[in-house]
Amino acid sequence: MGFRNLFGKEIRSMLPLYGVFAVVMVALDFFILYKSKTWANDVEMVLSLMIPFIFAGVLAVGTGYYQLQSEWKTNSIYLLLSLPIRGWKVLTAKLAAVLCLFLGTLLWIAACFSVILLRSKWGELMEAAEPSQWLPGLLNTAANSLWMYVLVVLFLTAVSQFAFLCGQLVAKLKWLVVLSAFLGAVWLVIRVTPLLSQLLEWTPDIFFGGLDLDAAYLHSGPFIVLLLLSIGLIWLNGYIFEKEVEV
Amino acid sequence: MSMSMSMEDREIMIELKGINKHYLLKQALTGIDLQIRKGSIVGLLGPNGSGKSTLLKMMAGLIYPTSGSIRVNGREPDVRNKQHIAYLPEIDNLYGWMTVKETLRFLSGFYSDWQADKAAEMLQTMELGENQKVRNLSKGMRARLKLIAALSRKVPLVLLDEPFSGIDPPSRSKIIRSIIQEFQSDEQTILLSTHSVGESEPMFDDVIFLHSGRIKLFDSAENLRENFGCSLENIWEKVYA
């Protein structure tokens, strides 16, 4: 009940921001549709899909940091710290809310692209090749890219929470500590992941692509390690929040 | 306040031994030894910066001592202990974007001891509109809302840090009457810090006078009045002169 309360509170507090982003996406896609006669397809794809997807990830990571910063700024941290709920649950509720809104945003971007832009080019696509030839590969690539992207955003959001909490442990030069903690954590994971993933050589590979397209087999080890490190970092963040941070 | 048992027979609710709290450039608390028994309303008095808020935060489990031991309700202040403590901080700690109703509903989800009827009754008594956003409430109204949040729970320990701050004098009397009315003397302990000594004096069973992080005086209100021959408000002036 407590976790659900916190999760609902986080979703409600961030909804206006993501709502504005959703409206901006619709406006952007209509603008691109208006310009589609003069712009190349690649430019449309980059502006309507790639850049918004990347921006959504950056927004999620930034929101992860901002969630904690606003608790301290508005003094609602006093309320959170006096609740009978473990630190990792408080922070996981925030992470879960960010990820849900992030996934929702990605779906919205894809839906806007499909409904506003892709619809006008659907006939061309059908004539170019049979859907059965390209659809399975496209779905495989999209699904694999999605979970990998979500995993990276989850990790970076946990790191941004970690960096903020490290900043709260010092009285002066907070920004320096925050930056060092963020960069240090990312560097450490990049260094450690290949070493640890060697222990997971027995795990299956991930098939990336389609049968008639260039396919890649990616070792799942690094992704499992990244997931485990993210879980470990969430636990560490919860410990720092509960035991070390003071107000 | 009359007791059915003598103070010595009552269990110890809060025990502090050799508590020190040191920040980067400041010693907030020094050598605090304290035992507060169940079933009393204790006044925590002292000027600004004397360590009252630090002491209450420590009991609520928001901060930890640099050295010494603290036991609240028989255990160290931790997450599980917070289930049995209602803490009202001095600062505004509520979410401005929530309404009054949403705030109380949000808080009720964390506590099995939440008394919805009592909260509704107090909302009416304190004349707070349910649908008002917290950020649109005046300072006094936010103070009342915090008080409702703390007193709507049936807990063995209630910690109130400057609960009357920002509240007009007539409302303070109403709140004091409400605290005394709701106080369950056999099961509950209230620790209250305030600068409004005159108004809250009738409530106190015991009083702690803090100064520069140390306990200057700790005794029953009755003994202090007898020994000093004056009210607590006048004792304040003598202690901090």
Image: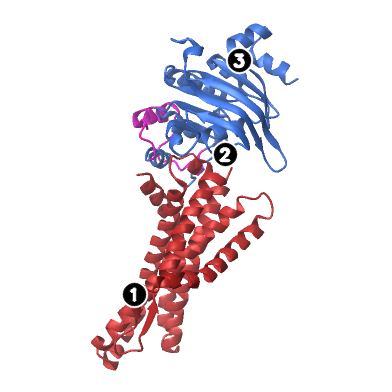
Chain colours: A red, B blue
Along the line of sight, the residue nearer the viewer: B70 or B182:
B70
Q: Chain of mark 3?
A: B
- Calculate the distance from the C-alpha at mark 3 to the C-alpha at mark 1: 71 Å
Read off the residue under disc 1: A204
In this view, the mark in front (2 or 1): 1
Q: Pinpoint the chain carrying mark 1.
A: A
* Residues at marks 3 and 2, CA–CA distance in whole angstroms: 26 Å
Residue B128: name its quadrant. Answer: top left
Quadrant of the snapshot with the N terminus of chain A: top left
- The residue lying toward the viewer, choosing from A98 and B216, is B216
Residue A216, given in percent of the width and then of the height, sits at: 37, 84
Mark 1: amino acid: Pro
Is residue A26 visible in the rendered image? The answer is: no
Callout 3 amino acid: Asp
Q: Are marks 3 and 2 in contact (CB under 8 Å)?
A: no
Which residue bears the numbered disc 3? B219
Point out residue B98 in the picture as x, y percentages from the top left corner: 44, 45
- Tell which of B53 and B165 is nearer to you: B53
Q: Residue furthest bottom?
A: A128
Residue at image position (47%, 73%) is: A54
Q: Secondary structure at mark 2?
A: loop
- Return the residue nearer the eye: A38 or A104: A104
Name the residue that disc number 2 marks.
B63
Q: Residue at x 45, y 81 (%)?
A: A46
Quick check: is A229 in the magenta stretch? no
